[in-house]
Amino acid sequence: MLEWLQNSPLAVSVSEDWFPWIESLHVVCLAAVAGTIFLVDTRLLGLTSRQLRITYLSDRLLPWTWTAFVGAAITGSLMFMAGATHYASNAPFLIKMCLLVLAGINMLYFQFVTFRSVQNWDTGRPAPAARTAGAISMTLWILVIGFGRWIGFV
């Protein structure tokens, strides 16, 4: 299946003609994802934007985060298609994918459990669970970026 995917007309076109452009767009999208997430995470940690409500910050940044994430997912999928057989056995790629899943689980837990009590800590110091979620999120995204960068060297 991976060979079929890699040999599809779209994957061949990406590989032969578009890869540098798609990779560049992927990096820009990932920078936007991480940047917007880091703004919220540093607020959750109490390091920045303490004068802003967390709900205000997240409401303004979340649409940008999701738009950039969709762009990163599309460009990442195209890059995967272009080298599917290589990426399927590339340890940094596989670790990056696992880290993305963990970041998603952290985000879901934060949104559906921790964030439910945001009215209690929206303007003050965030609850310990929120600070923990922010620290885990930043750590995971730094690792995603690091392992993503490492993919091309293996």
Image (tube, grey):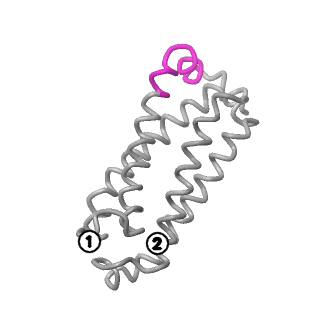
- Residue furthest right as drawn: 89
Residue furthest out toward the bottom: 120
Task: Kindly report the distance in space between the C-alpha atoms of the residues bearing marks 2 and 1.
Answer: 14 Å
Around disc 1, counting alpha carbons within 10 Å, would you say few (fewer than 14), some (14 to 19), or many (20 or more)? Answer: some
Q: Name the residue nearer the viewer: 40 or 116.
A: 40
Residue lying at 51% horizontally and 60% vertically, measured from the top left: 137
Nearer to the camera, 51 or 137: 51
In the rendered view, tell whether residue 27 sits above or below residue 100: above
User: Which type of secondary structure does the marked residue at label 2 adopt?
Assistant: helix
- Residue type at numbered disc 1: Arg
Magenta stretch in the rendered image: 9-23
Where's residue 88, x and y in %? 72, 36
Q: Is residue 125 above or below residue 1?
A: below
Q: Quadrant of residue 32?
A: top left
Q: Measuring 46% from the left and 77% from the top, which residue is drawn there?
A: 114
SS majority, magenta: helix
Residue drawn where x is 45% and y is 28% of the image: 24
Query: Which quadrant, please, contains the C terminus?
Result: top right
Q: Residue at x 67, y 28 (%)?
A: 153
Q: Residue 82 placed where, x, y %?
A: 61, 25
Disc 2 crowd rating (10 Å Cα; few below 14, some 14-19, many 20+) is some
Left or right, residue 51 beside residue 13: left
Q: Considering the numbered disc 1 on the image, is that residue within a helix, a strand or a loop?
A: loop
Residue with the mark numbered 1 = 53
- Which of marks 1 and 2 precedes in the sequence? 1
Q: Is residue 146 magenta?
A: no
The image's mark for residue 149 is: none
Residue under circle 2?
131
Can residue 21 be found in the magenta stretch?
Answer: yes
Asked if disc 2 and disc 1 are in contact, CB closer than 8 Å, the reply is: no
Residue 145: give x, y in percent of width and height.
54, 43
Name the kind of residue labelled 2 in the image: Arg
